[in-house]
Amino acid sequence: MPAPTRPTDAELAILRVLWERGASTVRQVFEVLSAEKELGYTTVLKMLQIMHEKGLVQREVTDRVHTFSTTQSQSQTQRHMLDDLLDKAFGGSSTNLVMQALATRKASREELAEIRKLLDQAEGRTP
């Protein structure tokens, strides 16, 4: 199977539900999403079918019940999307990406401390 394609915003919403809940039926995904936004059951079903064709989710059928789960972890998907963004928007420069991210949204003290910790680890200063 080829590597999954980059998910659309609507597909990411479904993936978030599956990452949070684990394997879920169409009805379960629909219930979570419809609490946030008005949409139809058949829309969710069609999106999951398309996502299955694209390799973003896998489907298990038991007693006519279709259960969907993700083919990649949230972390794997985020890394794939970030790598794509890094290449397309920042010419492969991690520095430019981080500088723009920090300039776009103010980081909390906790986030800055976590960033410092990651930088220290990258430089081999801490385990």
Image: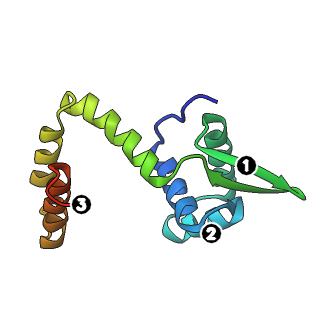
In what quadrant of the picture does the N terminus appear?
Answer: top right
Residue ID at (90%, 59%): 63
The secondary element bearing badge 2 is classed as: helix
* Mark 3–mark 1 distance (CA, rounded to whole Å): 40 Å
* Mark 2–mark 1 distance (CA, rounded to whole Å): 18 Å
Q: How did the renderer colour the structure?
A: rainbow
Q: Residue 93: x percent and y percent?
A: 17, 33
Give whichever of discs 2 and 1 has the lower sequence position.
2
The secondary element bearing badge 3 is classed as: loop
Q: Are marks 2 and 3 in contact (CB under 8 Å)?
A: no
* Number of the label disc, if any, that sits on residue 127: 3
Residue ID at (17%, 52%): 124
Indicate the quadrant where residue 21 lies. Answer: bottom right
Q: Which one is closest to the eye, mark 3 or mark 1?
A: 3
Q: Residues within 10 Å of mark 2 (few under 14, many from 20)?
A: some
- The front one of 69 and 120 is 120
* Number of the label disc, if any, that sits on residue 123: none
Q: What residue would you read off at disc 1?
A: 59
86 versus 18 height, above or below: above
